[in-house]
Image: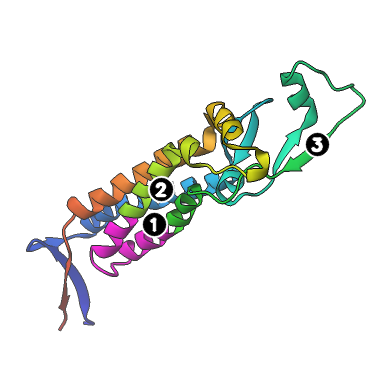
């Protein structure tokens, strides 16, 4: 008979069901963490005249925001003639701390995978939980940490625009999902015990 491997937890032999249950927090963290990262492409905030939607790419890395002149004029009480359509891009933001959230999410996902593979004992779990927790916090304070392009205007102008910012789907879902990932990894740290490998054979 060839050598086999079994695992013990706290001196008790683990069966296959126990090992699967111990991975559930990691799997949940992985799924929610990956989904939170894809909020990079979803509207994270809306602002200003016309309720312009800005994605994670716009507010985190300063990519140009596409605006429809008709919406802007309508919000200002003016209508664009029906035969005219004007769409333009403007760089409203520069790189902001929101970028840290989107950079921490992949780190957390990688750490979660390492934990699932049993590499590094509890260190990957702790790293993943910290990454997801910080990312969730940044999502929830997005309104206050976006950095406007200096060309938009001075401090008074940007402060007025900031007052008009409302959370959109991306920042809310990203924050909630990142928080769930953090809690899941904390559960992995505190609710499961380190596994001791026992090799048996004939």
Split into 4 quadrants, where in the image is the C terminus?
bottom left
Q: Which residue is mark 3?
A: 87
Work out which quarter of the rendered image holds the N terminus and state it: bottom left
Nearest to the observer: residue 132 or residue 7: 132
- Look at the numbered disc 3 and give the secondary structure of its residue: strand
Q: Is residue 33 left or right of residue 10?
A: right
Mark in front: 1 vs 3: 3
> According to the image, label 2 marks what residue?
135
Question: Whole-percent x and y of residue 66?
Answer: 72, 40
- Where is 168 relative to 181, above or below? above
Spatial distance from mark 1 to mark 2, Cα to Cα? 9 Å
- Residue 109 falls inside the magenta stretch: yes
Left or right: where 198 falls relative to 170: left
Residue positioned 71% across, 20% down in the render: 75
Magenta stretch in the rendered image: 107-128
Q: Which residue is mark 1?
A: 108
């Amino acid at each position: 008979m060839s050598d086999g491997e079994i695992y013990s937890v706290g001196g008790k032999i683990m069966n296959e069901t126990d090992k699967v249950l111990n991975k559930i927090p990691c799997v949940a963290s992985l799924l929610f963490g990956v989904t939170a990262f894809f909020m990079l492409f979803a509207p994270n905030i809306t602002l200003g005249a016309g309720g312009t939607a800005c994605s994670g790419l716009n507010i985190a890395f300063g990519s140009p925001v596409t605006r429809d002149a008709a919406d802007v004029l309508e919000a200002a009480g003016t209508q664009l003639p029906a035969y005219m359509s004007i769409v333009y891009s403007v760089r409203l933001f520069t790189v902001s701390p929101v970028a840290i959230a989107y950079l921490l999410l992949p780190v957390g996902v990688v750490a979660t995978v390492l934990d699932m593979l049993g590499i590094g004992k509890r260190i990957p779990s702790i790293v993943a939980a910290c990454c997801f927790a910080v990312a969730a916090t940044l999502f929830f304070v997005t309104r206050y940490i976006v950095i406007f392009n200096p060309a938009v205007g001075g401090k008074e102008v940007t402060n007025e625009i900031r007052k008009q910012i409302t959370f959109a789907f991306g920042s809310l879902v990203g924050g909630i999902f990142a928080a769930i990932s953090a809690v899941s990894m904390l559960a992995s740290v505190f609710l499961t015990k380190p596994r001791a490998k026992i090799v048996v054979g004939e």
